[in-house]
Image: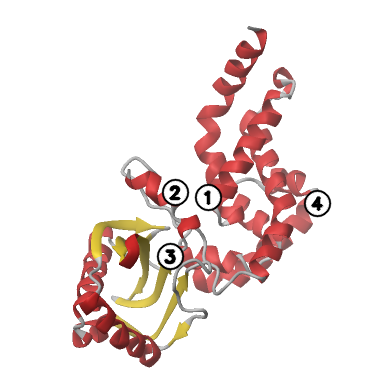
């Protein structure tokens, strides 16, 4: 009975903070499943903590989650070095009640190029607005060193931060046009949607067919979709819904062999500059839960 009461007391203080902690962990790990494991581990530690001595539970738990992520990032990076094909972050679909995501998929990929400490400093300070004193305590560095970590991270990811807001309706309108053009084989319409420097990225995780490396430039992306049009003519693509995916407009489809797929589009100046396709079933479990 005492154990149950203890767990209820711990949950009462933890559960209101869980969504924020999950956002921190996801941005650190790039994996929703890993983020959920980290947050659950943090809850177990919270249960074992003398909570009456914790003056600021949110700061305490944010530090706990960040340190757990730092512990795991080294092994996660080793796994990604031998990942079959291109690694993309797990897609997360924006829900009606959820907060808009200003950490877009291109920025998530840029964060992968940072050191774990740079990533943590940037996410905590620039994304969540945590003061440098707390960031320094979390990372075990002094405030000056922490500011340098955040500044270096900022310089690395500057080009991948959104430079202007695209109205949601306009983004989804372009996503709809891309879906129709790419599935119908209308290459003239598709060409009108793409920027000259467009890139395409796909993640099949070695479990579903996907390009093994990024496609770079208008000609390469168009050539691929011209060939793909013949495939779509024989194998219909079932549209599920429009969606905002990791802050980008896109859509969810079911492809051949009941393969769930998300497509997110980075749109700038009215043209598509980035196409991000997720086909790895292990990374789509969170999407399945969101859609169910």
Please say if the residues under marks 1 and 2 sit with CB atoms less than 8 Å apart. Answer: yes
**Residue tagged 1:** 32
Query: Relative to 206, does residue 46 appear above or below in the rendering?
Result: above
Please say if the residues under marks 4 and 1 sit with CB atoms less than 8 Å apart. Answer: no
Q: Position of residue 288 (x, y in %)?
A: 38, 49
- Seen from the viewer's position, the closer of residues 265 and 226 is 226
Q: CA distance from mark 4 to mark 3?
A: 37 Å
Sequence order check, earlier mark of 3 and 2: 3
Label 3: few (<14), some or many (≥20) within 10 Å? many
Secondary structure beneath label 4: loop
Relative to 195, is 49 on the left or the right?
A: right
**Residue tagged 4:** 141
**Residue tagged 3:** 278
Relative to 242, is 11 on the left or the right?
A: right
- Seen from the viewer's position, the closer of residues 225 and 209 is 209
Secondary structure beneath label 3: strand
Relative to 77, is 185 on the left or the right?
A: left
Q: CA distance from mark 2 to mark 4?
A: 35 Å
Q: CA distance from mark 3 to mark 2?
A: 12 Å
Q: CA distance from mark 1 to mark 3?
A: 14 Å
Query: Relative to 96, does residue 234 appear above or below in the rendering?
Result: below
Sequence order check, earlier mark of 4 and 3: 4
Q: CA distance from mark 1 to mark 2?
A: 7 Å
Secondary structure beneath label 1: helix
Residue depth check, mark 2 versus mark 4: number of the one nearer the observer: 2
């Amino acid at each position: 009975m005492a154990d149950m009461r203890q767990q209820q007391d711990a949950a009462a203080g933890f559960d209101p903070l869980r969504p924020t902690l999950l956002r921190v962990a996801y941005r650190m790990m790039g994996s929703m499943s890993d983020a959920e494991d980290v947050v659950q581990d943090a809850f177990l530690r919270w249960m074992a903590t003398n909570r009456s001595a914790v003056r600021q539970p949110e700061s305490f738990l944010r530090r706990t989650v960040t340190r757990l992520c730092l512990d795991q990032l080294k092994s996660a990076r080793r796994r990604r070095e031998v990942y079959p094909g291109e690694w993309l972050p797990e897609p997360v679909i924006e829900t009606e009640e959820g907060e808009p995501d200003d950490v877009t998929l291109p920025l998530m990929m840029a964060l992968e190029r940072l050191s774990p400490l740079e990533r943590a400093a940037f996410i905590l300070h620039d994304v969540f607005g945590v003061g440098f004193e707390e960031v320094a305590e979390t990372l075990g560095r002094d405030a000056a060193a922490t500011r340098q970590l955040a500044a270096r991270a900022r310089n690395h990811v500057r080009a991948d931060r959104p430079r202007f807001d695209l109205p949601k309706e306009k983004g989804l309108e372009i996503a709809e046009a891309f879906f129709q053009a790419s599935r119908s084989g209308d290459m003239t319409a598709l060409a009108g949607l793409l920027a000259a420097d467009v890139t395409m990225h796909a993640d099949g995780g070695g479990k579903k067919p996907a390009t093994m490396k990024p496609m770079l430039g208008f000609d390469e992306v168009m050539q691929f979709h011209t060939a793909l049009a013949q495939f779509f003519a024989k194998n219909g693509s079932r549209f599920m819904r429009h969606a905002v995916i990791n802050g980008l407009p896109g859509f969810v489809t079911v492809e051949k062999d009941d393969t769930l797929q998300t497509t997110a589009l980075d749109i700038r100046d009215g043209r598509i500059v980035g196409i991000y396709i997720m086909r790895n079933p292990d990374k789509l479990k969170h999407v399945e839960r969101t859609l169910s």
